[in-house]
Amino acid sequence: MKIVIALLALFVSYNTLASDSIRLSEPVYTDDNTEIFGGIFSLDEKAIDLADIVKSPKQYLNKPLLVATSITKVCQKKGCFFISQIDNQVVRVSFKDYGFFIPTDSSNKDVTLKGKLIQTKLSEERAKHYREDLGLAKDSLVAGSTYEFVASAVAIPK
């Protein structure tokens, strides 16, 4: 009987830990449907789909943008960045000045981002770090010149 209780307690503890979300930032706005992290912005404007941006990124560089995308995978350590994968293109989304984080259980949600697209060099060391934080295969995020979206705010559905 003690073994069954111990196993049950271990099972419940494991499932609780596995389903816990890390939330290091509180939303700056919330309603019945949405939480906004970073800064407040209006969702009334039409957002550009990130898939359209990656087709011709140079025309969008360093301009203020409102972007719609889906979160493929969130950093599970802090929620300090996420990736959005469009076909074979991976775009890393970071948060301006490392100023806020999103819940680590936000994967697979469709979000709206306010921010700008930048071009950056990704070192092999940094690419490895990101792959480890996300649990990705070695060929999914590689070193070199890449585009990154720097968000000043993120709207996430509840």
Image: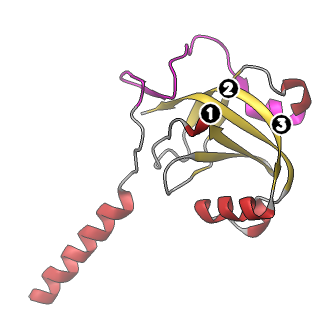
Under mark 3, the amino acid is: Val
What is the x, y in percent for residue 139?
79, 65
Q: Which residue is located at x 46 percent, y 49 percent?
A: 105
The tag earlier along the polypeptide, 2 or 1, is 1
Under mark 2, the amino acid is: Gly
Numbered label attached to residue 96: 1
What is the x, y in percent for residue 20?
35, 55
Secondary structure under the numbered disc 2 in the rendered image:
strand
Q: Which residue is located at x 41 percent, y 25 percent?
A: 33
**Between marks 3 and 2, how big is the CA–CA gap?**
15 Å
What is the x, y in percent for residue 54?
83, 36
User: With 5 as the anchor, is 27 left or right in this view?
Assistant: right
User: Residue 148: which quarter of the image?
Assistant: top right
Q: Quadrant of the N terminus?
A: bottom left
**Between marks 2 and 1, how big is the CA–CA gap?**
8 Å
**In this picture, is 12 found above or below 44?**
below
User: To which residue does mark 2 refer?
Assistant: 115
User: To which residue does mark 3 refer?
Assistant: 54
Secondary structure under the numbered disc 1 in the rendered image:
helix
Q: Nearer the viewer, mark 2 or mark 1?
A: 1
- Pointers 2 and 1 in contact (CB under 8 A)? yes
Under mark 1, the amino acid is: Lys
What is the x, y in percent for residue 104?
47, 49
User: Residue 71: which quarter of the image?
Assistant: top right
Q: Nearer the viewer, mark 3 or mark 1?
A: 1
**In this picture, is 111 found above or below 29?**
below
The tag earlier along the polypeptide, 3 or 2, is 3
Crowding around mark 2 (Cα neighbors within 10 Å: few <14, some 14 to 19, many 20+) is many
Q: Which residues fall within the magenta stretch?
A: 27-56
Is 42 inside the magenta-drawn segment? yes
Crowding around mark 1 (Cα neighbors within 10 Å: few <14, some 14 to 19, many 20+) is some
